[in-house]
Image (cartoon, coloured by chain):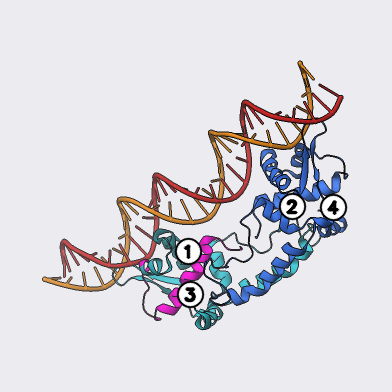
Chain colours: A blue, B cyan, C red, D orange
Amino acid sequence: MIFTKSTKYAIRAIIFIAERCEAKENCSIRDISGTLEIPFHFLTKILQKLTEAGILISAKGTHGGVRLNREPEDILLKEIVHAVDSEYSTEECILGFPQCDEKNPCALHYMWQEPRRYIERIIGETTLNDILKNNEIHKL
Amino acid sequence: MIFTKSTKYAIRAIIFIAERCEAKENCSIRDISGTLEIPFHFLTKILQKLTEAGILISAKGTHGGVRLNREPEDILLKEIVHAVDSEYSTEECILGFPQCDEKNPCALHYMWQEPRRYIERIIGETTLNDILKNNEIHKL
DNA sequence: CGGATAAAAGACTCTTTTATCTGATTGAAA
DNA sequence: TTTCAATCAGATAAAAGAGTCTTTTATCCG
């Protein structure tokens, strides 16, 4: 719908990491891949980006793996999305016109305004902590 | 964002057809392609789908082309989207879980509910006529 | 009527992007 | 120094998008 597979995998993985791996303990990518059924090497690349973005921290060798580099309340969904897909934008025209904006709106511009704002707010303001709270109750 | 390039092209093309081509007159795909800067053969395939779906009607030969097969108020955005991309669904989980639903919600399910409903309503209830009215005022 | 022409329809190939897989390298721990 | 696990490099596969060329069908014009 609005996320690529990479982004979906990133969010799923970070939820797993936050929940299953205690603060100071590493989570092996192999385990995450196995449990969440995400192709190992693909996941590897995605998590690397989260590491480069300072969201995760990684360790090589025995008992190595990844873990959160910050508290869940300090990680915005926005950061995760942008770490994986730097191009991601909610601004772009729904009909693909590069020149579409308030002054020069496309035929769907105004209808799309409300849902766009909703999406912007979700991505911009939701923290990993908010996501975890939701998941606690309704675990998938 | 939520539409593929094919779907965007389809919507842009049908707006063009509805606005520039008189009821009984055909619109050549070559013209549409040229004006809207959509690759000709790609557009051909997209419009074919709209024809198969009964949204457009086509004519071969000299002065051939395509035109609306129904009044704009009888063409739903939903039909256009589905004609081009039969898989399209607003139902699917934002995190890609096939088993995600009300009873078994993913961590983003509830936050996503509102924007999803908005999108569903736009796609499900907007007619080509609504789109044209918007375009009249704010022409892109 | 019959051939020339115009335009959609259809078959096929090529490119780009996204996703997946294979294997080698690096570095930490035991 | 062996082993484990992340990192890195590259190939392959699948899907979306774009391009080339042929076929079909309608109109035009003699």
Label 2, secondary structure: give it. helix
Q: Which quarter of the rendering shows the N terminus of chain A?
A: bottom right
Distance Cα–Cα, label 1 vs label 3? 16 Å
Give me the chain letter of mark 1: B
Give the residue pinned by disc 4: A71
Magenta residue span? B1-30
Distance Cα–Cα, label 4 vs label 3? 49 Å
Whether the residues at callouts 1 and 3 have beta carbons within 8 Å, the answer is no
Q: Is residue B99 left or right of residue B83?
A: right
Give the residue pinned by disc 2: A11
Check residue A61 for magenta coloring. no
Whether labels 1 and 4 belong to a single chain: the reply is: no
Residue B85: which disc? none
Horizontal and vertical percent for residue A46? 68, 45
Q: Is residue B67 left or right of residue B75?
A: left
2 or 3: mark nearer the eye = 2
Whether the residues at callouts 2 and 3 have beta carbons within 8 Å, the answer is no
